């Protein structure tokens, strides 16, 4: 990350003619004023009545910190290690699809920002740009590939193999999208980014997918994606076969139940991402942070546990790390930054989150990510 202090950044923003939104609410408000209702609603909304979306935020607000003082916090180490590689921050870019809705450069801009900030980037299957294009635009970035299963499982294996060939360093299999969640906002706006072609990147560059189409028309592409992207038959045997076919670490994204975490370990999975898909799949689901402690307990340090969903502030990340997460994935905030100012907007959002995290670690009385485990968190009941 940048060597500029958080104080320097705050002063720079205060003195700017057009200050960049700092908090999530201001980011969302600015993007709502800039984007059309359909794309904005798709990015902002949750499933159903949005209880899960609210539960994510409520989970963070239940926890309060009891800080320690009179300790030397002049030097803060925010580095983490994942799969033998050290990263300067505990952040990852969560996989968010179809970024071209927010900005014409889409995933390319985000990957360049990730490269600049030295934060691992997880690219979505339903990207506007192909994984090979992302690999080319950010060759030195740490990149993982998020995999949506396909009804034709050979498409899934093909995408995983392409990611490995392109230099991606892990596969993140999302397990909570066996069918589309009940998305009332999209129905209200009559908006489907899949049908508009925003997810063409990886599919139209996949030889197995394109070979399955009757022709190369746009209509065939849309039908092909819709026929493959939802996969209610996905099961542990598919996971084991993916593990057998890939040389990369395999993480499961969407785990909320400790019994599923146990099964993941039994099946040789290399990492878990605790996630409820940002509140966008099943409504009425436990907040991701509420699910985290039990999964951390079951895993007991055997594999990395990453927290995703509802992380809107540096303080949110601190709480997740203090509860045992090895890293934290950021989603909506960076997409809003992308919508506002492209690559620079992404960098500003992630830098603000990092600077808030760093000063909060010090004020809590810790000096490292591991040291946060000793911070006392009280939970409202």
Image (tube, grey):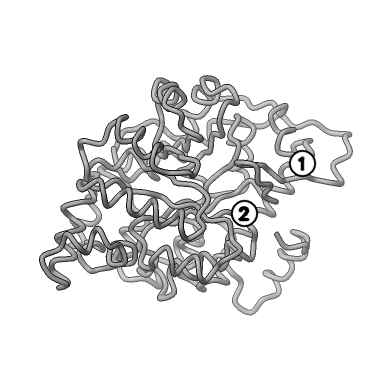
Neighbour class for label 2 at 10 Å: few (<14), some, many (≥20)?
A: many
Q: Which mark is residue 363?
A: 1
The x and y percentages for residue 16 are: 67, 76
Mark 2 vs mark 1: give the one in front: 2
Element class at badge 2: helix
Element class at badge 1: helix
- Picture residue at 15% right of the left edge, 73% below the top: 217
Q: Quadrant of residue 278?
A: top left
| Quarter containing the N terminus | bottom right
In the rendered image, the residue lying farthest to the left is: 214
Q: Residue at label 2?
A: 353
The x and y percentages for residue 141 are: 59, 61
Neighbour class for label 1 at 10 Å: few (<14), some, many (≥20)?
A: some
- Residues at circles 2 and 1 in contact by the CB criterion of under 8 Å: no
The x and y percentages for residue 177 are: 29, 42
Regarding residue 301, the answer to whether it shows in the image is yes
Q: Which mark is residue 139?
A: none
Q: Earlier in the sequence, mark 2 or mark 1?
A: 2
């Amino acid at each position: 990350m940048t060597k500029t202090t958080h104080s320097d950044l705050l002063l720079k923003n205060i003195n700017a003619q057009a200050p960049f939104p700092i908090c999530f609410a201001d980011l969302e408000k600015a993007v709502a004023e800039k984007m059309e209702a359909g794309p904005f609603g798709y990015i902002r909304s949750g499933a159903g009545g949005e209880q899960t979306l609210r539960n994510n935020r409520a989970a963070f607000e239940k926890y309060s910190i009891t800080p320690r003082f009179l300790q030397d916090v002049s030097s803060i180490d925010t580095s983490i290690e994942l799969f033998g590689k050290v990263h300067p921050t505990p952040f990852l870019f969560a996989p968010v699809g179809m970024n071209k809705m927010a900005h014409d450069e889409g995933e390319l801009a985000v990957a360049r920002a990730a490269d600049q900030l030295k934060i691992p980037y997880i690219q979505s299957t339903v990207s506007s740009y192909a994984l090979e294009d992302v690999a080319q635009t950010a060759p030195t970035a740490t990149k993982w590939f998020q995999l949506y299963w396909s009804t034709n499982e050979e498409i899934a294996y093909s995408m995983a193999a392409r990611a490995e060939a392109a230099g991606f360093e892990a596969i993140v299999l999302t397990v909570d999208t066996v069918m589309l969640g009940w998305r009332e906002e999209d129905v209200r706006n009559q908006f489907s980014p899949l049908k508009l072609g925003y997810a063409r990147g990886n599919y139209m560059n996949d030889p197995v997918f394109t070979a399955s189409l009757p022709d190369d028309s746009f209509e065939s592409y849309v039908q092909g994606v819709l026929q493959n992207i939802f996969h209610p038959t996905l099961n542990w045997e598919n996971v084991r076969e993916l593990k057998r076919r890939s040389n990369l670490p395999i993480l499961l994204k969407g785990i909320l139940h400790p019994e599923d975490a146990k099964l993941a370990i039994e099946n040789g999975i290399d990492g878990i991402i605790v996630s409820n898909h940002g509140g966008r799949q099943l409504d009425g689901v436990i907040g991701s942070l509420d699910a985290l402690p039990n999964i951390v307990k079951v895993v007991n340090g055997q594999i990395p546990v990453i927290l995703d969903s509802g992380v809107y502030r540096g303080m949110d990340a601190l709480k997740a790390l203090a509860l045992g997460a090895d890293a934290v994935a950021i989603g909506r905030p960076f997409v809003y930054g992308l919508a506002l100012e492209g690559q620079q907007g992404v960098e500003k959002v992630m830098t603000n989150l990092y600077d808030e995290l760093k000063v909060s670690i010090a004020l809590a009385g810790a000096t490292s990510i591991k040291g946060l485990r000793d911070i006392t968190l009280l939970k409202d009941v």
